[in-house]
Image (spheres, grey):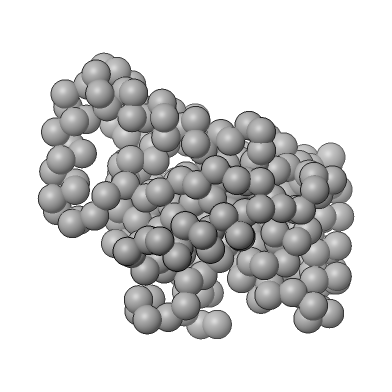
């Protein structure tokens, strides 16, 4: 993705909580910024929780008291020639305006900006925030209540914002998260046939259930998983298919 191309605005969003949207935002931002070398920013619009802003604060506090992470941060900055990506606190209604104000003063040209939105369309400004995005990736899992809620959300966005052409949104893609690999693969194939009948796209990569997704930096050191300051553990992202998942997303950006 060449730097002269316009900034791409992305969100992992749904109206159902507990499916990993904020965690995926952190992993995606850290992987794109620290592994792929793109210039990334996060706009945390999940007011008032601001979980990603709180995550960055926790990360910095752990680094201050953990020499191994301090050394790693210095090494990473020297190798990448870049600082940690910024996390900007905002609201759904003010997210894009706050980003524009930040961008105007920034010396860096950003490739990708990820917006973390509240888990409900009932919050003021959520629909307008989604309308200003380029791509929306919607996590889904094989649970009846989650499926019903998520499909309602996805079809509403697809029918009202994408098909009508009234928004900037180019594409919405569902993706399977928290997949139990003991479940029959055919079950997911059947679900995806249903998505197609509804006119919804679904990514091919399915992310399995892994406890490491929610593991934060530890004051005792150890492997890095969820962090705003470092790349996630390479062996873990390869094993769980996250690398393939992100490559699939990047291929969508490049194709379109």
Which quarter of the image is occupied by the C terminus? bottom right
- Measuring 57% from the left and 62% from the top, which residue is drawn there? 10
- Measuring 66% from the left and 53% from the top, which residue is drawn there? 94
Q: Position of residue 83 (x, y in %)?
A: 27, 49
Q: Position of residue 244 (x, y in %)?
A: 44, 60
Q: Is residue 229 above or below residue 166?
A: above
Q: Place residue 179 in its image quadrant.
A: top right
Q: Position of residue 166 (x, y in %)?
A: 79, 78
- Measuring 39% from the left and 41% from the top, which residue is drawn there? 228
Q: Is residue 3 above or below residue 9?
A: below
Residue 37 in view of the camera: yes
Q: Place residue 201 in its image quadrant.
A: bottom right
Is 122 in front, or is 143? 122
Is 74 in front, or is 157? 74
- Measuring 22% from the left and 30% from the top, which residue is drawn there? 69
In this rendering, would 121 be left or right of 52? right
Q: Is residue 19 above or below residue 81?
A: above
């Amino acid at each position: 993705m060449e730097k002269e191309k316009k900034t791409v605005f992305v969100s992992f969003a749904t109206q159902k909580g507990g499916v990993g949207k904020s965690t995926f935002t952190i992993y995606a931002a850290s992987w794109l910024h620290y592994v792929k070398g793109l210039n990334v920013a996060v706009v945390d619009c999940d007011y008032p929780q601001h979980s990603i802003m709180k995550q960055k604060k926790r990360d910095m506090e752990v680094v201050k008291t953990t020499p191994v992470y301090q050394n790693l941060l210095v090494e990473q900055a020297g190798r990448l020639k870049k600082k940690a990506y910024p996390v900007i606190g905002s609201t759904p209604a003010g997210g894009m305006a706050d980003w524009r104000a930040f961008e105007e003063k920034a010396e860096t040209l950003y490739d990708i900006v990820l917006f973390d939105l509240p888990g409900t369309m009932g919050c003021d400004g959520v629909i307008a925030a989604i309308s200003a995005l380029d791509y929306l990736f919607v996590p889904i899992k094989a649970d009846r209540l989650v499926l019903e809620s998520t499909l309602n959300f996805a079809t509403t966005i697809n029918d009202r914002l994408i098909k009508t052409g009234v928004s900037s949104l180019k594409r919405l893609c569902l993706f399977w998260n928290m997949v139990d690999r003991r479940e029959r693969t055919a079950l997911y194939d059947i679900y995806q046939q249903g998505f197609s009948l509804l006119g919804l796209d679904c990514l091919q990569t399915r992310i399995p259930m892994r406890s490491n997704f929610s593991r934060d930096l530890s004051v005792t050191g150890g492997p890095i998983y969820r962090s705003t300051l470092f790349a996630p553990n390479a062996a873990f992202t390869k094993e769980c298919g996250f690398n393939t998942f992100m490559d699939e997303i990047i291929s969508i950006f490049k194709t379109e």
